[in-house]
Image: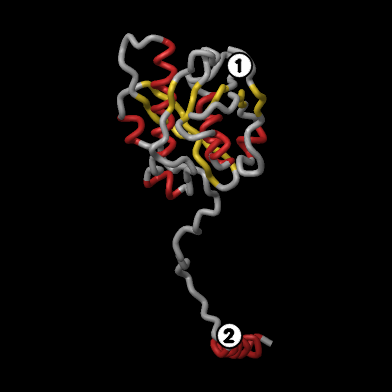
Amino acid sequence: MKARGLLTLPLLALLLAGCGIRATEVPTDFGPAPSMVPCSLTEPDVSAQASRGVPVQVFLLCGSSLVTVDRTVQVPDGTADVQRRVIVAQGLLDQLAQSPSPGEKDARYTTDVRGGMSVSGPRAKDPKDALRLSNSPADLTSYALAQIVCTFSDSAAAEGDGSVILGGPDDAPLRRYECTDDVRSAPGTKPPPSTEVTGG
């Protein structure tokens, strides 16, 4: 019985070799599996942290949702509150229009806000907290409008309740916009909820 068992071992080895199966004691390493989890920065943006100014957060797009990233905006010392809101809002717009950093691009962050847009304060008959964009909000994509509304609502550009009153360069009625959970999770499905503002 022992002799028969000893003869079986070489035969088994030959059969395995014939099938192309080779035993190995060295573990194979094909490298790390590619990341299947986008929208996650592996490390903080050093350039944003190194910049001097007022720390803010802006909302970028990633997948089908909005995500926050750290930025800074420059506000001169001693700026009056009314003008401060406009300066902060303009700085936020500029940050939204900038191309994401290399690390943010690797995490698949994008922006739908285009450069060249400006913001100004209220006109004579506007509410004091109104902001007017050089592009009508109605002409923006739902993604871009969601980015702007949510970024403004989380900053000094917003009212006390987090809502934002926006208008364009024309005489169209101002609207009060809100950044809701639905807007943050699915900004492209529909524009941020808004109501028409009447009176100053």
What is the crowding at mark 1: few (fewer than 14 residues within 10 Å), some, or many (at least 20)?
Answer: few
Question: In the depicted view, which residue is nearer to us: 7 or 13?
Answer: 13
Label 1 belongs to which residue?
Answer: 161
Residue 21 picture location, percent across and down: 55, 82
* Image-based side of 198 in relation to 25, left or right: right
How far is mark 2 from mark 1, CA to CA? 72 Å
Label 2 belongs to which residue?
Answer: 16
Quadrant occupied by the N terminus: bottom right
2 and 1 marks in contact (CB < 8 Å): no
Describe the element under mark 1 as helix, strand or loop: loop
Question: In the depicted view, which residue is nearer to us: 97 or 141?
Answer: 141
Describe the element under mark 2 as helix, strand or loop: helix
Q: Amino acid at mark 1?
A: Asp
Q: Residue at x 38, y 43 (%)?
A: 101
* Image-based side of 123 in relation to 165, left or right: left
Outermost residue to the front:
171
Where residue 162 sits, quadrant-wise, is top right
Residue 82 picture location, percent across and down: 43, 12
Where residue 17 sits, quadrant-wise, is bottom right
Quadrant occupied by the C terminus: top right
What is the basis of the colouring in this image? secondary structure
Residue 186 picture location, percent across and down: 64, 41
Number of the front mark, 2 or 1: 1
Question: In the depicted view, which residue is nearer to us: 196 or 144?
Answer: 196
Residue 69, placed above or below residue 88: below
What is the crowding at mark 2: few (fewer than 14 residues within 10 Å), some, or many (at least 20)?
Answer: few
Residue 19, placed above or below residue 63: below
Q: Earlier in the sequence, mark 2 or mark 1?
A: 2
Count of marks, rendered view: 2
Q: Amino acid at mark 2?
A: Leu
Residue 140, placed above or below residue 35: above
